[in-house]
Image (spheres, rainbow, N blue to C red):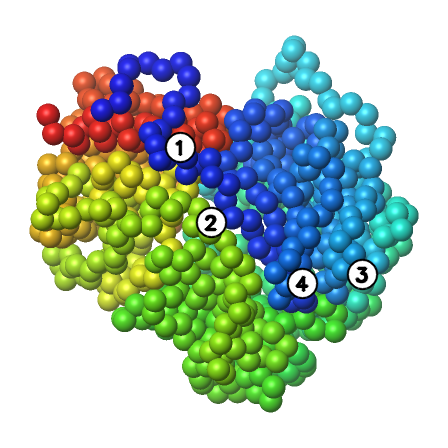
Amino acid sequence: MVDFPDVEQFWRSPPEPINQILDTPPSPIAWICPNLQWLVELEHPELPPISLLAEPEVAVAGFRLNPQTNGPARHNAYRSIKIRPLESNTPKVVDLPPDAKISFLRSSPDGNKLAFTLTQADGLELWVLDLAEGIPRRLTDAVLNAAYGKPFRWVSNQSLICKFIDSDRGNPPIQSPIPCGPLVQENLGRKSPNRTYTNLLKNPHDEALFEYYITSSLVEVTLDGRCIPLVAPGLIDEARPSPDGNFILLTTLHRPFSYQLPSSFFPHRIEVCDLTGKIIHQVADLPLADNLSTKFDAVRTGPRRVGWRSDRPATLFWVEALDEGDPTLDVPFRDALLELDAPFTDTPKLLWKSEHRFPCICWGREDVALVWERWYDNRKSRIWRLHPNSPATPPKLLVDRSYEDNYTDPGSPIMALNQYRRTVLRFTPDGKAIYLGGRGASPEGVYPFLDSMDVETGQTQRLWRCQDPYFESVLDLLDDENVMLTSRQSKTEPSNLFLRNRKDNQTVQLTFYPDPAPQFADVRKEVVHYQRADGVQLSAKLYLPAGYDPTRDGALPTVFWVYPEEFKNRELAGQVTKAENTFSRPHRTSVLFLLTQGYAVLDNPSLPIIGEGDAEPNDTYVEQLIAAAQAAVDYVVGRGIADANRLCICGHSYGAFTTVNLLAHADLFRAGIAMSGAYNRSLTPFGFQGEQRNFWEASETYIRMSPFTHAEKVKAPLLLIHGENDSNPGTYPLQTERLYEALKGLGAIVRWVVLPLEDHGYRSREAVGHVLWEMVNWCDRYLTPS
């Protein structure tokens, strides 16, 4: 057992080989250009130093920015670029300045150039790389504004539109140490429920900072370095060129701001301007969205999801709610899909009305578009085929299913580039069907597939299905449509890119990334199946340490890593969704690292919380949680793998909430580890996770589900970990602080670790190593036989 002092003043390191694995450089990120001609490899250190998190930052309106660079705070940039033709094995290292910090990569419309930013001490420069030449060029000084949204987009193959910092903005506003008066907010009887958010505006000084850093001008930058001003400085959110490059869809924010909501809810104006920057059409001027219901299908009124049709040169589309954005109203239709052609002077054309809420659309050609609708309360998901050129033609229902039903998931459309170099549906050579790639969950296991779907009938044909021992997913199709670009892995082979000819099933390997943690090569993994007492089928991933022999070694101390899910159908809750043939290696604070220390791991055991019909899942959350955990424990103990007296329950976020609930309500585990959780649901009174009701509508459920309420029942030793700067809605560090104080006051065995500068997920090398040290030591201390 490693020494376990009461107080540490420095970062601690986990035992080997965990340290060695953490310091092993990860495989590069492989990115295929949209024209499928070039493979780009990006070096990306997974664990940055804590010094990155310690850089200056300003938190405003729900996000953080770096005031020195006018870019995002805590941004872990790429370090190098390698390029090569898709089927070449000889990459070329792009010659960039030393210690390059590369971000916001975006290919040109034709896919032959790559634009990106380089972060300097005083800001972000715009660079461009011709992939055939392999020579990068700087286009601007450090003037790009990436504090909010994308800093640039391609207009054509020869120019980009960029958000520039206002050259006349001066120094940032300084807050007076003398208050000018009290901070006052009021509400005069208007309902304005909001979920819990962090990093919000708090006072007039924050408002001034928000305006100072977000204000940008819009400038066209050509590849020969000319800068052409387009739009005067303002609070620019997004600027999206039309497919033909003749117009820009401009979204800007404006006052009044909110102290309860992040910037995405602020008033915003949506306009179309031409390439001189002249505003020629206003789509909408939307007010502050501070009166939305907390129901999951609530939306703001007015145009939303405004964008360009990718299959036309310059046609706007958007969606408007027909139910005032209120899912509790009983109406025949929820949303309307509309479009408007350039020059934007006609009356918008109605393309479709949906019975449920509109989430997305895929454009194909003049007579084919696919549109989705979903509804949370009944988990309904539908896909319709529209005739955009003939809205009077009745839409065709292609898919009608519950989105909880993984076995009937048709997959996602495979896309292709059209004449505008925008992505549209990829059609089969005869034009009658589209391609779909899916994960392929089935009663026999999870096997990714490629299908075709007839757009007239909705009938599908299986073109290819992954076979044992691989988990191989289709990423794209090459021009002849028989050759697929895939990502393939197995239990023993890391993920790599391949070209697979589906006619003769021959493959060409494109990348050769090695095992980043060969210490795990002999770890045994299997997907196990068992049953809850009420008959619901459950599953989990069981990992056993390398060299483990149950006859020789007996039952092991075992760590459970948990995260529950809500369902409306008990049969669908029991479907097989865990893939057997995936390559499993730990990273960051993964519980799998404990395998190197002799522990077994039961990863993600099914914890379905089911509420069929009018029943709400969470009203029986505790009972269902205990039943599912009991079934998992009975299974691994019954197999002789796990020692019933040496079990540890662990989880992060909602899994941490679950961990403490299991310790409070069941005597199954001898220790617990809870990271970045929320434990008192009265502090998230307008909904959490899958719960739509507010505290006053379901106070008994909120109170019963809150482990803080039952802290006196927690008898097992509990390790609490939380990032000091957690920005995730609801999981304030205060949640862990209050639980620790309650447990300490009740005489429990509890340890509270606050990670300086860390957010909801832990990123720095120092913090990740320390968390793993804490986990190993906690388990060693309380699961090791006395």
Query: Residue 157 has which mark?
Result: 3
Answer few, some or many: residues within 10 Å of disc 4's Cα (few below 14, many 20 plus, some between 14 and 19). some
> How far apart in space, not on screen, are marks 2 and 1 (Cα)?
47 Å
Residue at the front extreme, as displayed: 90
Q: Which residue is mark 1?
A: 19
Point out the tag, 2 or 1, that comes first from the N-terminus: 1
Q: What's under tag 1, amino acid-wise?
A: Asn
Of badges 3 and 4, nearer the viewer stands: 4
Quadrant location of the N terminus in the rendered image: top left
Residue at 49% from the left image edge and 79% from the top image edge: 502
- Helix, strand or loop at label 3? It is loop
Residue at 39% from the left image edge and 64% from the top image edge: 471
Q: Could you tell whether 95 is left or right of 741 in the image?
A: right
Residue at the bottom extreme, as displayed: 430
Q: How far across and down, in percent of the image, does residue 250 sit?
A: 75, 52
Of badges 2 and 1, nearer the viewer stands: 1
Q: What's under tag 2, amino acid-wise?
A: Ser
Q: Which residue is mark 2?
A: 293
Of badges 2 and 4, nearer the viewer stands: 4
Query: Residue 97 has which mark?
Result: none
- Residue 779 lies in what quarter of the image? top left
